[in-house]
Amino acid sequence: MALRMYNTQTGEKELFVPLTPGKVGMYVCGVTVYDYCHIGHARAGVVFDIVFRYLKYAGYDVTYVRNYTDIDDKIINRANQEGTDYRTIADRYIQAFDEDMALLGLAKPTVEPKATDHICGIITIIEALIAKGHAYVSEGDVYYAVETFPGYLKLSGRNLEDMQAGARVEVGDKKRHPMDFALWKGSKPGEPWWQSPWGNGRPGWHIECSAMSMEFLGSTFDIHGGGKDLVFPHHENEIAQSEAANGCQFVRYWLHNGFVNINAEKMSKSLGNFFTIREVLKKYDPETLRFFILSAHYRSPIDFSDQNLDEAQSGLERIYSCLAAVDDVLQGHAPSDEVAVIETLSQVGQELQEKVDQFLPRFVEAMDDDFNAALALGVLFETVRATNRFLAETKGLTPLSLQLVATVRHLFVEAGSVLGLFGSEPSVWLERIKSAKSGQIDITHEEIERLIVERAEARATRDFKRGDEIRDLLLAKGIVLLDSAQGTTWNVK
RNA sequence: GGCGCGUUAUCCAAGAGGCUAGGAGCCGGUCUGCAAAACCGUUAACGUCGGUUCGAAUCCGACACGCGCCUCCA
């Protein structure tokens, strides 16, 4: 099987063949840095992180470019509100973005360019567009004339007439056609500006991506990604700019991730139903959020809710618990490289061996099929079950069975490196979840410990009534007691 | 109005003509003084109505419901 991916432009899954064998150029629209990122940004970030990681895993030499749009109306507005300059705002939210994405475990792209570092490239493209008759100057602004580009709207499969029928487009008198869009905007007093052949001004939205992708990936490159909401107008406009200026195909594969919904409705700023990554991470572990995002196919919508996050956490805990048990077994029982003498596996051992043998082929098959991470997770869970069963039913681990368990561990590390999961020490991660939960209770650890001791004493004298009373008391406060041969520990419900 | 997408068991969610997806939950079991936790096992589904086919969640058509884009958006 070979990698196939869904191309928005054709509406089909296509076999991936890079422009240059062994190499991939990939550009993903980052963020406009004027506020903290929300869960929708988290999804886009994670989705294309997986694409990036999987391409590398598949052996490609990947150049991954993800930009910061650090000059824009929204940034300027925000700066005016706060009585500061655009740079302060942009830098603040670039830093916040970096922090959020690092928490979510995103690998660093090869390059993370800023629009304002590419003003020259932007001006060059605009000049070329004007020279070729695709753009025109109008009172200090420069606009792209959409009617001059025959392929306009080919990505979203629409036409200009239909678009205007529902028209909520402002007809600016500076524009020749209502759908024309700004490449360059003359600056008003007090606004940031750069010198240009058309006077002082700043770039419009869209053009920065054409300039930066061309700078780092060339006129034609393999993959361009972003959220579905960027298909129109952002990506259409990028195509129009780049293809008209360069006279060649811009992007070979267009990838778009689905939305994050709240109660089945798109999360968006205008609806006011959004959560920032920071807010969510106060309550949930970042890996839980990442796991949640990966539990659905990247093109489907996902519904963000406490219940769904809780379920994701339960699932991830299941995997980490299994890995913790595996590490426990492996600790002190380093599997020897010597092949065991004549030794055969038990029935459950053979079943696990089978899962282990199928693991990578099935994982790769899932990921090859348009990055189906949800299916890939299914493979992991099946292996977890087989491993748990093997561990539970195997007494006295032989060299062969230890080797098997060690292989399981390696496979999870390998798959985890592609999914950006299981980077933590399992026992540490589980402990962190526990302590995070304990932040939400109103009883001190000392008090809990005192009651546990009291209960132990009661049980020692077979005063089970008192013991159960204490257990119920703690349960009412959300504390679950875990009795074991080694004593009693506790957890938050 | 134009264009597009979706509807899978209690919930989340893969799959896309015949082959156990998976997770959470329920229930049963192991363990326990009893529980809990953990682990094991188990259950159930393809929106409605037609059509194509030996065979349809899967393909085709109609309908219903939900959603998205057409304005800034990941």
Image: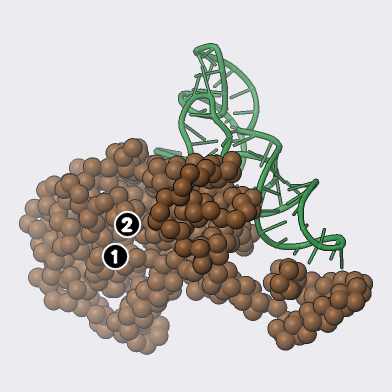
Chain colours: A brown, B green
Q: Residue at x 20, y 78 (%)?
A: A193
What is the CA distance from the residue labelled 1 to the residue labelled 2? Answer: 8 Å
Q: Residue furthest front?
A: A341
Give how far across and how far down residue A35 sits, in percent: 41, 74
Q: Which residue carries the number 1 mark?
A: A109
Question: Are the two marked residues, 1 and 2, in contact with CB atoms closer than 8 angstroms?
Answer: yes
**Residue A326 found in image quarter:** bottom right
Identify the image quadrant of the C terminus of chain A.
Answer: bottom right
Q: Quadrant of the N terminus of chain A?
A: top left
Query: What percent of the width, then of the height, locates residue A55?
Result: 30, 52
Q: Label 2 amino acid?
A: Phe
Identify the residue position indicated by label 2 in the image. A52
Residue A202 appears in view: yes
Q: Residue at x 13, y 61 (%)?
A: A125
The chain holding disc 2 is: A
The chain containing the residue under callout 1 comes to A
Does B45 sit above or below residue A244? above
